[in-house]
Amino acid sequence: MATRETWTTDEFGASHEGMVGVLLADGTTPGPVSFPMMSGGNSHAPISHWSVYDGSFSFVPRAQALRAVCSCGWTGPEHQLDWDEIGDQELAEAGGDAADACATEWDTHTAEVQRSTIPLPETITALLSQLAEEIEKLAKTSPLAALRASRQLEVTAAQTAYWPAHDARGEERLGQAAAALGLNADDTRHLLARFGRWNPYS
């Protein structure tokens, strides 16, 4: 059993990390569950995967509903669990449709985040898409050439983003930059520092 299952996108990363969240009957969210070992006093690593909250042990609370949650603070609608209908089924199976719905709702959330970011000119979007397609085609005949092309992309990105990063630097502009990029403040600070070549903690 995984400790928990999370979702991210390549562009937004940890700024919008999603997962299936659990709500108890009193509306609270439970903490991770530590299952004791069969012998001795040690416990397995704490688990917060939604499927363990079935109330099967006294120390394991029972989920009343599932909902999508995101590290940015967004939450999706609640999907109630009918325990009379679930009966003796494993929650991992009985709650599968609700968990899938949570993933779909989080996908919709990240699509909305993407639409809220600063738009790119169509010429730039088209060129980036074409470049990605050309490198993928090149990889089929010459993987090393494709690697060199990708490395050149890294160099170009570092060169072209240096001054924009410095222009956007400063706490007074950090919120504006974060909203434009769809990132949280900490990830934005680190991104600007990486492109601007300064210490993010300075």
Image (spheres, rainbow, N blue to C red):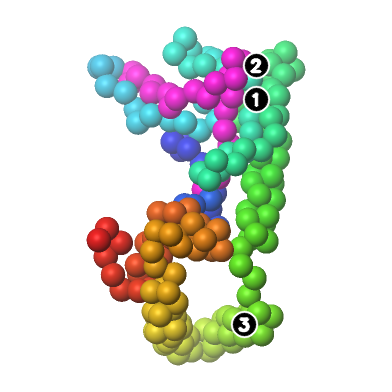
State the extent of the magenta-drawn residues as a range: 17-38
Camera-side mark, 2 or 1: 1
Residue at the limit of the structure toward the right, as seen here:
85
29 falls in the magenta region: yes
Q: Is residue 10 above or below residue 92?
A: below
Q: In percent of the image, x 53 and y 45: which residue is there?
A: 72
- Reading the image, the residue beneath label 3 is 124
Sequence-earlier tag: 2 or 1: 1
Compare residues 16 and 147 and report the one nearer the observer.
Answer: 16
Specify the quadrant of the image occupied by residue 31: top left
Alpha-carbon span between mark 2 and mark 3: 55 Å
Magenta region, main secondary structure: loop
Compare residues 27 and 96 and report the one nearer the observer.
Answer: 27
Q: In percent of the image, x 39 and y 22: which residue is there?
A: 35
Q: In percent of the image, x 46 and y 62: which residue is there?
A: 173
Give residue 88's mark: 2
Circle 1 crowding by C-alpha within 10 Å: few under 14, some 14–19, many from 20 = many
30 falls in the magenta region: yes
Image position, residue 10 (x, y; %):
52, 62
Q: In percent of the image, x 53 and y 24: which residue is there?
A: 29
- Reading the image, the residue beneath label 1 is 65
Q: Is residue 3 above or below residue 158?
A: above
User: Do the residues under discs 2 and 3 have CB atoms within 8 angstroms?
Assistant: no
